[in-house]
């Protein structure tokens, strides 16, 4: 049984997708572009062309996986999704076709590209129609800056999602950058433990200091709630070339979290290496640095803590879906055949309570 622990499906990005308008949705997408700068392919690396959050740059959702905008008199684009996305949507039927083509049995839907309340309903419909192919995770807005009533309402939405919308995990349940080890967050962690819901942490893509601060806070949460199931997504979130000033030794800085009793490390995020200028020969399949990192995690905590997640369709910016699967199946010689079965499906099945076949 093969389980992809990180996939997406979403309606057309040029629509509202649960926001008050298509323009509002486009602005939410634009607000994230600066965080991708230098990692995804653009037609310029001139910092003056970077679209800033809320800036009027005529931001547009184009075809073939691209965002477009106009700044400083220049037409700019970013290759946000694969070129094969001739229209900017990834319907569940297409995701299933890709899964069928490479032999993936079940995919874990991770939230994104939609307003979070809309997304919960969208994912619920996917699981309802294809219960043997999809598992749903959800996002909530447990925001420490907002009222206690707001946070209680978000936890009520989470309970409803579990009871009525097939939710089996949470993807980043709070705004990034908040002090999530403080007491105000205890009801969130307590609820996740009670409901047996893994939390997928979105860390990294930020300077070294805040990344290390997030790890420190996660260690605090782990000590306080040792039964909390933690998923470190995107290879831990901050894989950078050694020449980068924000580079960290992933296993070294995450060692305490990895050694916790219920921590899982997401393998497969080869887009970390997609920038040829940064990674040189390591930027292409079979991604030797990916194998090296997985071997270090394996030597630290064993195969039972590794889960494979492709981030399809985004993965196709770097390699094919089959190649992403083969980075584990064919290019991790330190894993036995039984251990590969764990990493490629059995561990995720246990984590998300998926019946094995």
Image (cartoon, helix red, strand yellow):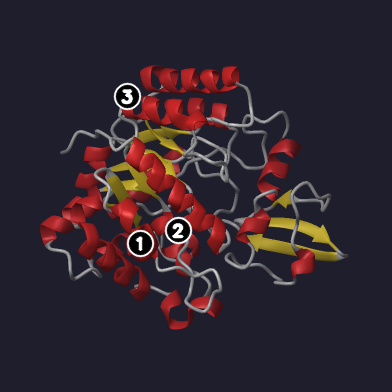
Residue at left offset 40%, top offset 43%: 220
Q: Is residue 21 visible?
A: yes
Label tally: 3
Indicate the quadrant where residue 301 lies.
Answer: bottom left
Q: CA distance from mark 1 to mark 3?
A: 34 Å
Mark 2: give few (<14), some (14-19) or many (20+) Cα within 10 Å: many
Local secondary structure at mark 3: helix
Residue 106 horizontal/vertical position (percent) = 30, 41
Which residue is under mark 3?
A: 194
Residue at left offset 39%, top offset 25%: 191
Residue 254 horizontal/vertical position (percent) = 37, 58
Residue at left offset 62%, top offset 22%: 147
Local secondary structure at mark 1: helix
* On screen, residue 176 above or below 252: above
Q: CA distance from mark 3 to mark 2?
A: 33 Å
Mark 3: give few (<14), some (14-19) or many (20+) Cα within 10 Å: few
Q: Are marks 1 and 2 in contact (CB under 8 Å)?
A: yes
User: Of circles 1 and 3, which is in front?
Assistant: 3
* Tag of residue 324: 1
Q: Is residue 160 left or right of residue 12?
A: left
Which of disc 3 and disc 1 is earlier in sequence? 3
The quarter of the image holding the C terminus is: top left
Local secondary structure at mark 2: helix
Which residue is under mark 2?
A: 315
Q: CA distance from mark 1 to mark 2?
A: 8 Å
Residue 316 horizontal/vertical position (percent) = 46, 60
* On screen, residue 181 above or below 291: above
């Amino acid at each position: 049984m093969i389980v992809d622990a990180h996939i997406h499906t979403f309606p057309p990005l040029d629509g509202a997708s649960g926001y008050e308008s298509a323009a509002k949705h486009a602005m939410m997408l634009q607000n994230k572009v600066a965080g991708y700068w230098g990692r995804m392919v653009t037609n310029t690396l001139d910092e003056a062309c970077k679209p800033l959050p809320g800036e009027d740059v005529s931001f547009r959702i184009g075809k073939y996986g691209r965002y477009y905008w106009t700044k400083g008199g220049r037409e700019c684009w970013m290759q946000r999704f694969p070129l094969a996305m001739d229209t900017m949507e990834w319907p569940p039927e297409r995701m299933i076709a890709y899964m069928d083509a490479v032999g993936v049995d079940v995919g874990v839907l991770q939230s994104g590209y939609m307003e979070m309340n809309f997304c919960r309903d969208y994912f619920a419909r996917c699981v309802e129609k294809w219960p043997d192919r999809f598992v749903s995770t959800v996002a909530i807005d447990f925001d420490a800056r907002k009222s206690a009533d707001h946070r209680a309402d978000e936890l009520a939405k989470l309970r409803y999602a579990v009871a009525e919308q097939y939710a089996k995990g949470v993807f980043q349940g709070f705004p990034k950058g908040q002090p999530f080890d403080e007491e105000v967050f205890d009801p969130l962690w307590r609820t996740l433990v009670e409901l047996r819901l893994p939390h997928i942490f979105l860390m990294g893509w930020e300077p070294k200091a805040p990344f290390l601060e997030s790890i420190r806070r996660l260690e605090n949460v782990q000590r306080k709630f040792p039964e909390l199931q933690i998923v470190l997504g995107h290879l831990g979130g901050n894989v950078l070339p050694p020449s980068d000033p924000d580079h960290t030794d992933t296993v070294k800085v995450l060692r305490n979290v990895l050694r916790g009793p219920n921590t899982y490390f997401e393998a497969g995020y080869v887009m970390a290496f997609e920038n040829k200028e940064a990674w040189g020969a390591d930027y292409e399949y079979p991604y030797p640095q990916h194998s090296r990192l997985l071997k270090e995690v394996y030597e630290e905590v064993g195969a039972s803590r590794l889960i494979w997640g492709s981030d399809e369709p985004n993965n196709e910016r770097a390699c094919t879906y089959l190649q992403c699967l083969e980075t584990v199946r064919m290019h991790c010689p330190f894993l036995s055949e039984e251990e590969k079965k764990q990493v490629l499906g059995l561990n995720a099945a246990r984590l998300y309570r998926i019946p094995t076949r």
